[in-house]
Amino acid sequence: MTATCVPAAPARIAAANCLLCGQPAAPGPHCPGCAGRIRHTAAAIAGLGTDPHRLTRALELIADGAIIPAPTPGTWTSISSTGTTTYLTTPSTCTCPAAASCYHTLAAIILTAAHAQAQPLPRT
């Protein structure tokens, strides 16, 4: 996996549709339902003793719409804080140079869990 350059991303991207479920999003990149699931998941992760700075950075990344679903399920594209580089991110790996202190993976964990909660249960 390699990093690629992209144009600078504006802060707080206003998406017409939720980046997770596709429903109308207002304000921000997620609909109210997914935003609630993101907050709930983040609160649960915070209760596990996650580094507060890393969690804050992950939530900023999510709120800015700077982590978006990639074509491969379970994979995300994270935009660097400078907006000049993108990283391929999963809940367990990231192509950024930060290694263990990477907050992109934490954002991917939060979004993957929120997305799973948004999926309808199969009918039996």
Image (cartoon, helix red, strand yellow):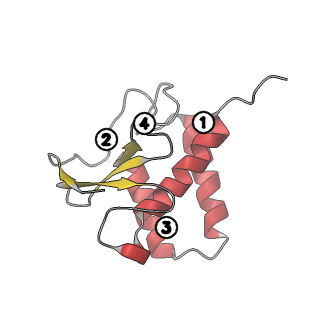
Q: Do tag 4 and tag 3 residues touch (Cβ < 8 Å)?
A: no
Residue in front for this viewpoint, 67 or 14: 67
Residue 19: where, in percent of width, then height? 44, 36
Regarding mark 3 in the picture, which secondary structure is present there? helix
Quarter of the rendering occupied by the C terminus = top right
Vertical placement of residue 64 versus 56, above or below = above
Q: Do tag 2 and tag 3 residues touch (Cβ < 8 Å)?
A: no
Vertical placement of residue 54 versus 106, above or below = below
Disc marking residue 13: 2
- Please state which of the two labelled residues, at mark 4 or mark 2, is closer to the viewer: 2
Per the image, the residue denoted by label 4 is: 27
Residue in front for this viewpoint, 36 or 85: 85
Per the image, the residue denoted by label 3 is: 55
Q: Is residue 123 visible?
A: yes
Is tag 4's residue or tag 1's residue first in the polypeptide sequence? 4
Is tag 4's residue or tag 3's residue first in the polypeptide sequence? 4
Q: How far is mark 3 from mark 1, CA to CA?
A: 20 Å
Quarter of the rendering occupied by the N terminus = bottom left
Q: How far is mark 4 from mark 2, CA to CA?
A: 10 Å
Q: How far is mark 1 from mark 2, CA to CA?
A: 18 Å
